[in-house]
Amino acid sequence: MSTGNGSGRGAAGNGHGARLRLKLRIWRQAGPDEPGGFLDVDAHDIPEDCSFLEMLDIVNERLIDDDIEPITFAHDCREGICGTCGVMINGRPHGPESATATCQLHMRKFRDGDEIVIEPFRAASFPVVKDLMVDRRAFDRIIESGGYISAPTGTAPDANEIPVPKDVADFAMDAAACIGCGACVAACPNSAAQLFTAAKLGHLNVLPQGQPERWRRAEAMVETMESFFGSCTNHGECTEACPKEISLDFIAVLNRDYLKAKVKNRRLASQT
Amino acid sequence: MARTVTPTGAGTSERVPPLRRRRRELPWPLNIYQTAVGKKYVMAGTGIGLLAFVIVHMIGNLHLYEGPTQINEYAEALRDLGGHLVPRTLILWVMRVGLLAMFVLHIHSAWSLKEISRRSSPKANWVSGNKRYAGGQDYVAVNFASRTMRWTGPIIGLYVLFHLADLTWGWWLGDGYIRGDVYHNVVESLSSIPVAIIYIVANVALAVHIYHGMWSAFQTLGVNNPRFNHLRRGLATVIAGAILVGNLSFPIMVQAGVVA
């Protein structure tokens, strides 16, 4: 946590920003099959410069001091790129800020006296492990079924050997930005994983390197997704919740590629 | 973090099993309908077919404003489609069967997809299939139309049955129904205030359903191109609006005494 407040904002007295008193309602659940419920926590003296996860760290330290078991939550890189963290904050995945993962959400976005409801991401295929931590291995099953390319090992190919149009490269990169946090599933009223699958499928299917396995990939990933998650109704909640702002355009790509995969004569796939 | 906590009940959370396994795969193209994305294609395709019907039906009904002779001749012309080339009412019946098939597929796909979503969502609402958070969910992108698709759909379905009983089979009007005299039947039926209210409510539901359905169909069918994406929402709004104005005009004009 930075002590030298570079922005000069809120530099009161000791050089730190203001401190908040928050009324937290945190979901506690002992295990996957245990009933859960909210724990009310009076979180006082929370520095507004700390991140949401650091706020939870502070709360946990105090719980430990009081001999209460700390709240379990998933986290790793804390710089918005690993996709491990993620909780529902006041009914929104990753909280009120757009394009922000939970770890990058800072307490200055809240006001003194705010009530914050913290709940795990919910979907039938995201069982709660404990408290705020959910098991997102259903995503791994989707990736395993086709979210890769098979490349011969050996000498590394020369850079730029395969020409990729700039628009295609940009579009693929937009999809590849997905960190697999599961906010799209959490936000979706249908618990559909269309945005995640579309991002993982789309970034390979639009690139030349992804072409050999394109139709197999589209079919396998969509069908694995369907065995775990709900059905998309194009609300668009996923895109709004996505910390990487993955576009709904990729869902259209997924739909199109899936139908083509079901119709195409794959023996002639290399003919254009 | 002070300490690492081993999840209690470890072992029960070892594996996340699939919620559903696919049944035996049917021959192509039926296997496409066995999947959720395939069902979405069918829902979008039949939705477009039904939308085309709604547009043509609304435009055809505008003959009402030309007078009794014209609307009755229009109704007669529908039965005579194909002229002397085909038996009378054959083409009308082919279209009716097609329409019925589209209705059945649209409803079946919608129902099964709702069930898939309901089973994938904890504490799901029975009608909408949507999940519920204990602390509530703060929606950002949904609109009234997208949230109510699974309510407006059944409203339209029930209304279609009433509409058929009213103006096609004549059950509602009883002795007041004169077969073939469209103008008379429409005025007789819509001059009743409760019936006019049913028509107005149902047609508002229809327009709301189309507002989300048409936009959604583009997305489902993969019709997505940055060159024209900005037009998709506008087109859905214009068409839903035109259908709303056209269809609402009939009960309102009959009630106002313009058509009598």
Image: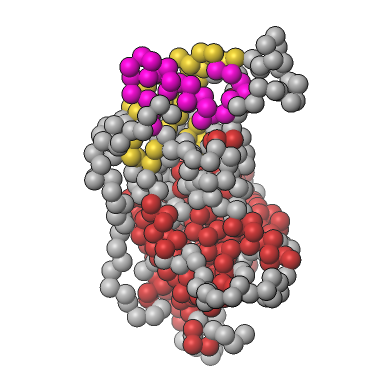
User: Which residue does the image show at 38% across and 54% down from the upper left?
Assistant: A138
Tell me the quarter of the image containing the N terminus of chain A.
top right
- Viewed as shown, does residue B83 lie left or right of A120? right
* A209 relative to B122, above or below: below
Where residue B27 appears, as percent x and y from the top left, is: 34, 80
Q: Give the range drawn in magenta.
A: A46-72
Q: How many numbered markers are drawn? A: 0
Question: B176 or A206: nearer the eye?
Answer: A206
User: Which residue does the image show at 62% across and 85% down from the upper left?
Assistant: A272
Q: Please identify the residue farthest to the front as the structure is shown.
A: A155
Question: B257 or A132: nearer the eye?
Answer: A132
Question: B150 or B173: nearer the eye?
Answer: B150
Inspect the magenta stretch and tell me whether residue A58 lies in it.
yes
Q: Please identify the residue farthest to the top as the structure is shown.
A: A13
Where residue B209 appears, as percent x and y from the top left, is: 53, 52
The reply to whether residue B105 is in sight is no
Question: B250 or B16: nearer the eye?
Answer: B16
Where residue B147 appears, as percent x and y from the top left, is: 50, 44
User: Which residue does the image show at 41% across and 66% down from the upper left?
Assistant: A145
Inspect the magenta stretch and tell me whether residue B5 lies in it.
no
Where residue A243 appears, as percent x and y from the top left, is: 58, 44
* A222 relative to B259, above or below: below
